[in-house]
Amino acid sequence: LITSIDSAKVQRGEFFFEGTANVDEFAIVTIGKYPYVKSVEVVLEEGNICVYMDTAFVASGTYLNDLHNSLNSEINRLYKLYYDFVEKEDAIGRDKAHDDYQKFIYNATIENRLNLVGRRFIADNKSAIWPLENLVKLHEKLEALQNNNSLVTQADIKGFKELLDKQAAFTKKQAGTVNSQYFDFVLQDTLGMKRSISEYVGKSRLLFVDFWASWCSPCRADIPHIKEVYEKYKDKGLNVLAISFDGNKTAWKSALKKLKMPWEQLIEVNGTNSDLAKAYQIYGIPYGILLDSEGTIIAVGLHAQSLEELLLKEGLK
């Protein structure tokens, strides 16, 4: 429930409020009329607060508002650094960046647990704490500082465990398709013609089927690496088939023009809720499977790096 406290008129690009401090909850300053409303969150603490609402939306000038900005800025910087290493497939850099990311969340929570900004920060970021041991560690530390803390609770830990159990069940189902025969489906190619997966099976020693979508950033990030693997092994028996879960054919074709993948393209217009996704136990993308010339599923859950490691094991040198 949002309660209107005050209003002001913008004159010469500026507006002013005066009132009572309130550091127990965020206030929201808005400008414009529905549906063209812009907004920014503000802590109404004592002092002169500058709220900028133009090319950026930020409140600054007081301790808590500046803290809110700095915490969000740093967590975004650390996540981008981590994701850059993921895209580069730099395992050492990725792991260090992940540790730095986790340590920042932990330390920021401990240091700011008693103020509004710190409480909001952990509410926004505790779902990113990984693995479970880190969440338990933070819970125990907060409990030592304040019994029955409400920031990281036993319910949070229980929810995390339930999520891990679901993921383990998904992985088990996916692994259950290994050594079984592939599932054939009739899809569409770039010209709108009906094509079966079976048309591509058995044409090469190994067939890598890449399930992706134009809206999936990790999928698009992996494609250049798949290209490298394809160029390296295409003359040694590897072929690739891409199957998109795009519901929007225009977006799909636009992505194809930009990504320039040198292999066949099909689309499942019913997306990730399709019978195809259910048959292959696909709960997230990118998701790759490798078939032999007989159509037997050799491996599942592959991306570019794990694909190349598997190809080496299969003797494609």
Image (spheres, rainbow, N blue to C red):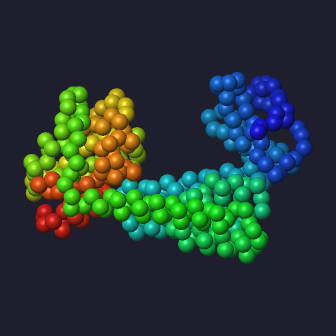
Question: 183 or 30: which is nearer to us?
Answer: 183
Q: Is residue 160 above or below residue 275?
A: below
Question: 13 or 165: which is nearer to us?
Answer: 165
Residue depicted at 21% across the width and 58% down the height: 180
Residue depicted at 20% across the width and 31% down the height: 194
Q: Quadrant of the N terminus?
A: top right
120 lies left or right of 235 = right
Extreme residue in the right direction = 20
Q: Quadrant of residue 263?
A: top left
Q: Is residue 68 above or below residue 186?
A: below
301 lies left or right of 41 = left
Q: Is residue 225 visible?
A: no
Residue depicted at 71% across the width and 58% down the height: 118
Question: 290 or 43: which is nearer to us?
Answer: 290
Q: Is residue 138 above or below residue 228?
A: below
Q: Position of residue 42 (x, y in %)?
A: 75, 44
Extreme residue in the bottom direction = 144
Q: Position of residue 193 (x, y in %)?
A: 20, 29
Q: Is residue 204 above or below residue 126?
A: above
